[in-house]
Amino acid sequence: MDVLTENFSLYAEGFLGTLELTVYASALALVLGFVMAAFRVAPVGSFRVFGTAWVTVLRNTPLTLLFFAVMLGLPRFGIVLPFELFAVLALGCYTSAFICEALRSGINTVPVGQGEAARSLGMSFTQTLGTVVLPQAFRSMIPPIGSTLIALAKNSAIAGAFSVTELLGTYKTLSELGYDIIWTFVWIAVGYLIITLAISAVFNVLEKRWGVAR
C-alpha cells in the first residue's frame, strides 16, 4: 500500500489522463465509425470505396506506427497540436475502423426487405438508415462496441511513450524513486481494471435493456 499512498497524486494524475484519453478517443471513434459505416453501405460507389479503404488501412496498421505517423507526420504539414490531442486523434481514428465494422455487422442483421420497404415509401438513404435500419441494428451492435471501447482504454497505454500523461507512464517515475516494480504495476493494473469494468458495466446495462434476447 505504501506505493499507492505515498504517490497517490501521481497515480491520480495518470488515472485521469487515461480516463480523458479513453473518453475523448471513444467519442471520436464512435462518430468516425458511424460515418464510415454509413459510407460502406451507401449507394454511392465512391463513398463505399473510401469507407472500405479507411477500414482496411487502419485495421491492418499497427497502432504504434499510427502514433508515429500522427505525432511526427502531421507537424511536417504544419499541423501542430498538443501531444494529448495527437494521441486522441491516433486512438480515435484507429478504433473507428473497428467500430465501423461492428456497426456494419449490426446493419447486416437487418433484413434487406426493411430497407427496400422504406425506399418504396419514398424515404431517402439517410432517412432509411436513421429511422429504420439503425434502430433495429443497434440491439446487436452493443456487445462488440463495448468490447472495442474496452480495448481502446487498454491501447491508450501506448500514448505514454509519446510524452502523454497516462496511467502506465507512472511506472517510470516510481521506478526511478526506487519503489518495488511489482507493486507499482499492481496498482497500475487496478487503475485500468476500474476503467474497463466501468465501461463493461455501462454496456451490460445497455445490453440488458436493448440487447438481443437469447
Image (tube, helix red, strand yellow):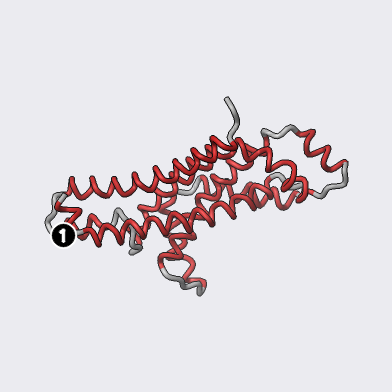
Left/right of residue 158 with respect to residue 101 in the rendered view: left
Q: Name the residue under label 1.
A: 176
Q: Of residues 159 and 19, which is closer to you in this image?
A: 19
Residue that appears at 67% across and 33% down: 109
Residue that appears at 45% across and 65% down: 85
Left/right of residue 50 with respect to residue 4 in the rendered view: right
Count how many numbered circles sit on residues in the image.
1
Pinpoint residue 114: horizontal percent, then vertical percent. Answer: 78, 36
- Say which amino acid is labelled 1: Glu
Residue that appears at 20% across and 50% down: 184
20 is higher (above) or lower (below) than 33: below
Pinpoint residue 200: horizontal percent, then vertical percent. Answer: 44, 41
Point out the image quarter for the C terminus.
top right
103 is higher (above) or lower (below) than 82: above
Pinpoint residue 112: horizontal percent, then vertical percent. Answer: 76, 34
Look at the numbered disc 1 and give the secondary structure of its residue: helix
- Check the image and name the residue furthest to the left: 178
Residue that appears at 68% across and 46% down: 40
Left/right of residue 161 with respect to residue 142 in the rendered view: left
